[in-house]
Amino acid sequence: MIVELGHLALILAFCASMFQLVVPTIGLRYRWFNVASLASPLITIQFLLTLLSFIILVLAFVRSDFSVKLVAKNSHTLKPLIYKISGTWGNHEGSMLLWVLILTFFGFLVAFFGNNLRNSFKIKVLIIQSAIACFFFAFILFTSNPFERYDIPPFNGLGLNPLLQDPGLAFHPPFLYLGYVGLSMSFSFAVAALIEGKVDSVWARWVRPWTLLAWIFLTIGIALGSWWAYYEHGWGGWGVWDPVENASFMPWLISAALVHSAIVLEKREILKSWTILLAILAFSFSLLGTFIVRSGIITSVHAFATDPTRGIFILLILVVATGGGLALFAVRYRHLNSTRSFSVISRESALVVNNLLLVVSSFVVLIGTLWPLFSDLVFEKRVSVGPPYFDIAFTPFFVAIAMVLPVGAMLTWKRSNLSYAIFSLWPALLLGISLGALVWSFQTGGRMLGPVGVSLATWLICGALADLWSRARGKTMVNRFFRLLRTHRSDFGKCVAHCGLGIIIFGISAITAWESEDIRVLSPGETYTMGQYELKFLEVNKFQNQNYIATQGEFRVYKDEDYLFSLFPEKRFYPIARVGTTEAAIDQNLFRDLYLVLGEEQESGMWSIRTYLKPFAIWIWIGAFSMAFGGALSISDRRFRFSSGAKKFSKAML
Amino acid sequence: MSFIWGARPLALSFIFFLMPLLALSVEPNEILNNPDLEDRARSISKSLRCLVCRNESIDDSNAELARDLRLLVRERLVLGDNDKEIIDYVVGRYGEYVLLKPKFSFSNIFLWLCGPIMFILGLLFVVSFYWRKTKTEEIHLSDEDENKITELLKD
């Protein structure tokens, strides 16, 4: 009965979203502001109803109510509680419900915090947000209803895909969806601004934190996903340019561009039409990502429920949202002229270059991802586009971004002087080049990736620090240091985020250039060396856990005959799903990861063992989280909190 | 069109996806004694797609076919073929679909050039933007500024 209540709540939410499309619009048209103001309570109702229906679905999973098809297909009584809960969104239907829950949640936030927005503008934003929600409610109800029942419930469920029985599932999708869906806010704001034909710095002051928030969530979501892949895939792959990964990487790149162009719009009231275009594109890319992931149109290594009819429905949403947004843009962009000018050497120009590079690189990823499809349709030729392509086609643009970034960040608005930036940056440049040269002279073999990565990373990190230091002006060092503590949080945020990018570049080039691998067959009791370590293979144990059978190896690691630690790589077999997984044992520190995988049992009681030394692997994720943290610092800046400008604006317009 | 809408049986693709995790890719008994040849074998297998898997190279995959291909690559290496000959041989047998790095051919030309083309178009657009701005405001650029623009565009 309670499950039907969830279904009913979802249907009511769908009705509310349709109501929202019609009533406030009529209200706006005839200037009946009481009617138009229904937009806020209506979106709140949508949010609460969706929340109710989501909670009911979670409860069905927790109580293992196998009369619900979705639960029977994806859960099992023997599963630990946390995976019963996270299993709610470990499938297509449940994850779409989470999607739309977050969508209405963001709408609710606008209704709740948007008091300083002009009323008619806020209503327009809410109407557009509901239009998107309306499509997704229909999508869920008509093609992927999570509340369908069996007439005769099965005795037990089929269980969750064992690969998904991991804490990764609990956190990675929600963060990713918060990011994807967060970009719907930028979209709604952009379309509302196009309808009104007015974009100014107050608009940017609203859009920038929301986009930044979405970008932070995307960053965390992608980082968590890559971390999950790193320890779950048996060879430590943290990213393989798979279509599903690209699907989240493209909106990340575009939203990074949007965050930067919104700064220009906020400070200088230029790049208006460009920023609007980016806002439309950013959400289009996240819809495209959803389409790629759910339609199964492009084969991916990551498992996902795929179904052509669902694909067509999402394609429809994508076409309506993107096509509608772009068509509106084409009609209205001329209204968004800005008159101010800026010189070629200026912060504005630097950010234009940043935007150009980010957008081009994201389109390279887009074309590479969709090319197999295009080639099959147009040339009737099946081709694959894999990591070697992306490494060649994408990397140059990102190297260019890294090279330009520190200089661009130092320039001042309007008209700037290159010599000042160069004066402050030459230590960073010198240090970067010399560290790169040092690494080059130390390493054996000719790969340039390591030295170049170290150079770029040093340049970025020292450049970001130099930028922050130059902001604190003072006569003495102590004086300057105290000034530094009082600089704006957004300046700190910028520094931390840019350092984060440098750290990621360092981590990626280090792991790619200097990883070492060892594959061998061992019998228990044998010892082998890996780099500076001696590994002793003690024994293999089998034991039964709640819902799997584990085969666990025990290894002792020595260095210079001193015992350091033990590692326990594991293989699991899940009898319900009849599927096995590997659980690598990883010893992690700041300098290297020792990554150990237990392979197959060979004849005569020997085991195949894989050992990897991955230098500086952890820095990839330290870098990613620094970027997210930098963004968070920036959002927490006092100046962001809908400052006097916004208040003045709302008063003037009422 | 069957490829486009993924008519392949769902259950089957699901099994292929999970297979690599039952056991792991390159097995110890496949490895060549000569480390140089083995290095080459690894880099070749990283650029070849496992045909029955979901977007994995034969180096990462544990499907039977991937194993056969890995052994084939190593056999040829031992016989003294160079990398290009081996890749051409595999492409000859399975078609261009096995290449994870598409050929630089007529039909793929846009794939390879899209990045540079978009970048150049973008730059032209930006330059025209500056040009329009300076024209409407009737500010004449000095020679020095002109030089700066060309300097900037070179990067």
Image (spheres, coloured by chain):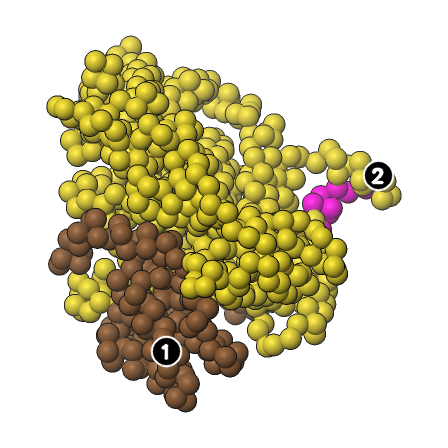
Chain colours: A yellow, B brown
Say above or below: A27 vs A220: above
Q: Where is residue A241 in the image (x, y as percent from the top left)?
A: 40, 57
Q: Position of residue A244 (x, y in %)?
A: 35, 50
Range of magenta residues: A466-475
Say above or below: A171 vs A67: below
- Dot label at residue B59: none
Q: Mark 2 lies on which chain?
A: A
Residue drawn at x 46%, y 78% as measured from the top left: B32
Q: Which of A322 and A193 is in front in this view?
A: A322
* Helix, strand or loop under label 1: helix
- Residue that mark 1 sits on: B73
Left or right: A220 with respect to A503? left
Residue drawn at x 24%, y 53% as measured from the top left: B13
Residue found at the far top of this picture: A34
Left or right: A393 with respect to A513? left
The alpha-carbon separation of the residues under discs 2 and 1 comes to 66 Å
Is residue A470 shown in magenta?
yes
Q: Give residue A434's quadrant in the image.
A: bottom right
Q: Give residue A85's quadrant in the image.
A: top left
Question: Can you say which quadrant of the picture contains the C terminus of chain A?
Answer: top left
Q: Nearer the viewer, residue B131 or A296?
A: A296
Q: Nearer the viewer, residue A272 or A262?
A: A262
Q: Which chain carries label 1?
A: B
Residue drawn at x 17%, y 54% as measured from the top left: B8
Say above or below: A140 vs A565: above
User: Looking at numbered disc 1 in the image, what kind of residue is underneath it?
Assistant: Val
Is residue A641 shown in magenta?
no
Q: Where is residue A341 in the image (x, y as percent from the top left)?
A: 51, 49
